[in-house]
Amino acid sequence: MIPQSLKAGSSGEIDFIQGMMRGTRNPMNAPPRDELIRLFKNKRQEIESVCLNRFSTTTTTKSTLTKDLSRKKITELQLVAVRDLLVETIHHGKVLIGRIIAPPFKVNAIQLLLEDQVGGGQHVVQVSIYNYVLPGKKRLGLELDTAFPVGAIVARMWKLFKMLIIHITNEAWKQVLQSKLPKDIDGDDGWRVRGNKYYTDGDYERALDYYNRGLEIDPHHTILAQNKTAALVALKRYQECIKLSLSLISRSTAGVNEKVCARLAKSYYGVGLYQESLETYQQLLTLLPNSSEARTHITKCKERLVELEQGVYNFTSLKSEYKLTKQIDCSEYIGPVKVIHSEEKGRGLVVTQDVPVGTLMMVSHGIGVFIDKMEGKEQQQIIYNVNFRDKQAFDIVHTNIVSLTNSAIKNNPYLGNLVGKLYAGPNYSVSNQIEVDEFRVTKEILSKTPTVPSIEQIQNIVKYNAFKSEVNNSNIMDYIYYLRSSITLV
């Protein structure tokens, strides 16, 4: 597996970075599914205009990986999910089942874009095929499309000196695939039961995959959808949980399910809609009068609303909370300020009224918060990721902030609309006309189609907007604020 951010590098550059990341998941994460498909199709078009009309040639491997012989029988191979693929690693005894979702192209190796058939199509990966010999009798583009047509289900397994791609057309492979996947939703080994097992084990991502596959079979399966809300809350994917919970409540004929109600209230709280969370917890209290969760969070919601509307905080309590949990539970606050733009200095923040000294002007949550516990400044300077397109190198701190920011946006896409407003350098356009109200979380913002920044854009946003503060003598906290950073000079 080659991290997506390294695809444009030379062979030597890729080998160097991959060696550092061996045995780990790509810390940069993959771009969103639609973005990855768009980039792949653009690359195909780019190459098509140059060489796909030429006749094909043999593809040989230039990989430095040492490939050990796999002696597993087909029936003994275990499925591996896209998310479990590790950098610079041969996955012994594993097989990746994927569906081709975009026309292939060939540079040195043949490139395929596969949709994971285990995860319900939620995960996509680009794979490189070496040592596959095309007939060489037709134009390259035609031979690629014939050998690897869009929609074909293929299996990728690791063998001596090559990674085999096998089309799932013969009965033996069909039986293997079918034997490893659940037969139904509610059976002893069904999609719901397997999902519940993964949820109990704390593997919420995989649990969500199995719930999604079951819902593909029966979109109106209420219990499966309710279980999905639990997985979404566990993954802090609050925006998606709100939408699904409201849908479940609206179509229920048996009244509001208390578990769905609790998850909806928690999701409202997670995105900062404290009034909606308060009302939902009050509703939960009518369903479960003895619920300590509802009573505790009703108190918390009232505290958050005071912070949100009046800017009154108990900072002593917040500091004590952070010492215990390394987290701070508080509302954001925007005081009497607005963002202006000047031709000489770019964006700036000004007050809208006279304010006395010591007035609290704003409180903003950090995104991509990374606490650096590394000892020795020389380790922080190690190049951990490279953006070859923009010819930039990034250390481990920057890489982690980007990764955490990207994950936060994937979990709650509305954050993409906020982060995307930040300055990302001269190659990215950004509006100078920004109102502070655009950073207030509302139901309307959650319902808008999100604008998801690319990894390259997030890299530049972090480059120009990251803050650094010392937590104690040994830990440094790095992060970005979507509100405070909005006044970065442009």
Image: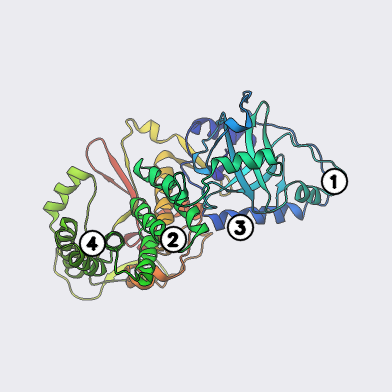
* Closer to us: 258 or 473: 258
Left or right of 97, for residue 107: right
Helix, strand or loop at label 1? It is loop
Residue annotated with mark 4: 331
Q: How far apart are labels 3 and 2 at the CA level?
A: 32 Å
Q: Amino acid at mark 2?
A: His
Q: How far apart are labels 3 and 4 at the CA level?
A: 37 Å
Q: How far apart are labels 1 and 4 at the CA level?
A: 62 Å
The tag on residue 38 is 3
> Which residue in the rendered view is the most extreme toward the bottom?
353
Crowding around mark 4 (Cα neighbors within 10 Å: few <14, some 14 to 19, many 20+) is many
* Closer to us: 148 or 245: 245
Q: How far apart are labels 2 and 4 at the CA level?
A: 36 Å
Name which residue lies at 40% across and 43% down.
Answer: 198
Q: Is residue 28 above or below residue 355?
A: above
Q: Is residue 231 above or below residue 268?
A: above
Helix, strand or loop at label 3? It is helix
Left or right of 475, for residue 129: right
